[in-house]
């Protein structure tokens, strides 16, 4: 499958500028899963800016 890295970068909401996985969604997801977290694109903008990628933080963001 062809990677659409440039197209993905244009839509990536991660604010971590120096991330080597920006636009490489499959690598980003794998990296965060291995470290017990979630990618920044799953978080609301204000929560994403904290760089806390924990599953606990993600759950708190969507509690009703």
Image: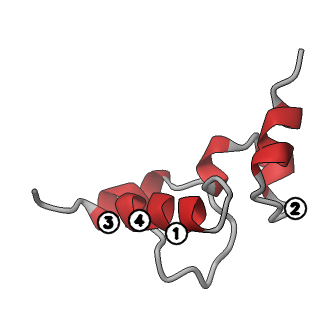
Q: Report x, y in % for residue 51.
A: 80, 65
Instruction: Return the mark for residue 31.
Output: 1
Determine whether the residue tagged by mark 3 lies in a helix, strand or loop: helix
Q: Residue at x 12, y 60 (%)?
A: 2
Determine whether the residue tagged by mark 4 lies in a helix, strand or loop: loop
Report, in whole angstroms, how far the alpha carbon at label 2 lies from the one at label 1. 18 Å
Which comes before the other along the chain, label 3 or label 2? 3
Which comes before the other along the chain, label 4 or label 2? 4
Q: Which mark's residue is nearer the viewer, 1 or 3?
A: 1
Q: Residue at x 60, y 49 (%)?
A: 41
Mark 1 crowd level (few <14, some 14–19, many ≥20, 10 Å Cα): some
- Name the image quarter holding residue 19: bottom right
Residue tagged 4: 23
Determine whether the residue tagged by mark 2 lies in a helix, strand or loop: loop
Q: Which mark's residue is nearer the viewer, 4 or 1?
A: 1
Left or right: where 21 falls relative to 6: right
Which comes before the other along the chain, label 2 or label 1? 1
Which comes before the other along the chain, label 3 or label 4? 3
Q: Is residue 28 above or below residue 47?
A: below
Q: Report x, y in % for residue 38.
A: 64, 53
| Of residues 27 and 23, the one drawn nearer to the viewer in this rendering | 27
Residue tagged 2: 50
Which comes before the other along the chain, label 4 or label 1? 4
């Amino acid at each position: 499958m062809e990677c659409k890295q440039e197209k993905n970068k244009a839509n990536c909401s991660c604010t971590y500028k120096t991330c080597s996985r920006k636009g490489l969604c499959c690598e980003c997801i794998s990296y965060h899963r291995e470290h017990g977290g979630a990618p920044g694109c799953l978080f609301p903008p204000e929560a994403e800016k904290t760089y806390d990628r924990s599953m606990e933080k993600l759950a708190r963001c969507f509690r009703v």
